[in-house]
Amino acid sequence: MSAKQVRRAAAAQLSAAGVPNAQVDAGLLLAFVLGRSVGELIVVDELSDAEANRYRELVDRRARREPLQHIVGHVAFGPIELEVGPGVFIPRMETELLYAWALEQIEKMSHPVVVDLCSGSGALALALAVGHSGAEVHAVEIDDAAYKWLCHNLSRMPAEVGDRVTVHLGDAADPNILPEVHADLVVSNPPYIPVGAELPVEVADYDPATALFGGADGMSVITPMISVVARILRPGCAVGMEHDDTTGNLVMDALETDGRFGSITQNHDLADRARFVTATRR
């Protein structure tokens, strides 16, 4: 069967189903079925019946708005690839901006201690452990299902990375969490969406609610977590917290109200949306 025709039909099906970036997803799914990169698809002229049938099955799943990452089983994040599926939040490209900022904060330190609160799949924690060969990283996650994905992704890391990462099953807002840790950097992509916000099907139906929602104002996790950050963060060191694009001012106000932070800064994503706030422990 003609690969171009099958791919074109898949893109049309996905577009009709309301899938964003239908052309891109059609190509990614075909590359996955064939075990090739998207760039290599240009040399593929024909599909076997088995390949075409398998492709249609996956396209049907995507047309039902199952996330692409669940279908292929993994997602790229910074320098690493994470396995994801039901029960864990799918890392988004926008969070890579927080990762890049965080790496800049520790790049000149020889053995920084990094804490990732609300770690989920381990995206920030593991990417920072890979990005800095001397970093000691602590990843905290409260949800049992997400914690299992975190541990699974940690197990896939090379020993020289995995040996520097410790995972903790616990509440990032617990004032007694990580009692012996003194961090040079804290990062967090916590549950921050205000309850009732309109969400894409892929998010609303597949990402776990515990990883999404932060109460009526999006701050139910962030506000108590700030006290934890202030306790574990060394003076002069930085924190970066992602937030909903409607709540940046609330996060900045909460840090200011705490009184132990300075250099409070709003950071924007590539679409100029308020994405994460950074601050320095006084």
Image (cartoon, helix red, strand yellow):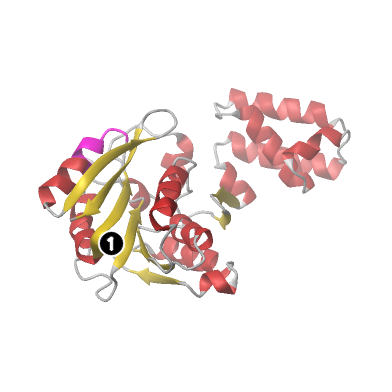
Q: Is residue 273 visible?
A: yes
Expressed as whole percent of the image width and height from the top left, the position of residue 170 reads 31, 68
Residue 223, given in percent of the width and then of the height, sits at 19, 51
Query: Is residue 249 found inside the magenta-colored segment of the image?
Result: yes
In the rendered view, tell whether residue 24 sits above or below residue 213.
above
On screen, residue 6 above or below 130:
above
* Residue in the image at 68% along x and 42% along y: 58
Q: Is residue 144 left or right of residue 181?
A: right
Q: Quadrant of residue 112?
A: bottom left
Q: Nearer the viewer, residue 64 or 186?
A: 186
**Foreground residue among 30 and 42:** 42
> Is residue 151 found left or right of 138 in the rendered image?
right
- Residue 215 occupies which quadrant of the picture? top left
In this picture, is 3 found above or below 181?
Answer: above
Residue drawn at point x = 60 percent, y = 38 percent: 62
Q: Which residue is mark 1?
A: 172
For label 1, the SS is loop
Q: Residues in magenta? A: 245-251
Where residue 83 sits: x, y (%)? Answer: 57, 57
Residue 125 lies in the magenta-colored region: no
For the C terminus, the image quarter is bottom left
- Residue displayed at 67% across by 37% down: 59
Query: What amino acid is labelled 1 in the image?
Result: Ala
Instruction: Say which quadrant the N terminus sits in.
Output: top right
Does residue 194 appear in the picture of this structure? Answer: no
From what the image shows, is residue 152 above or below residue 124? below
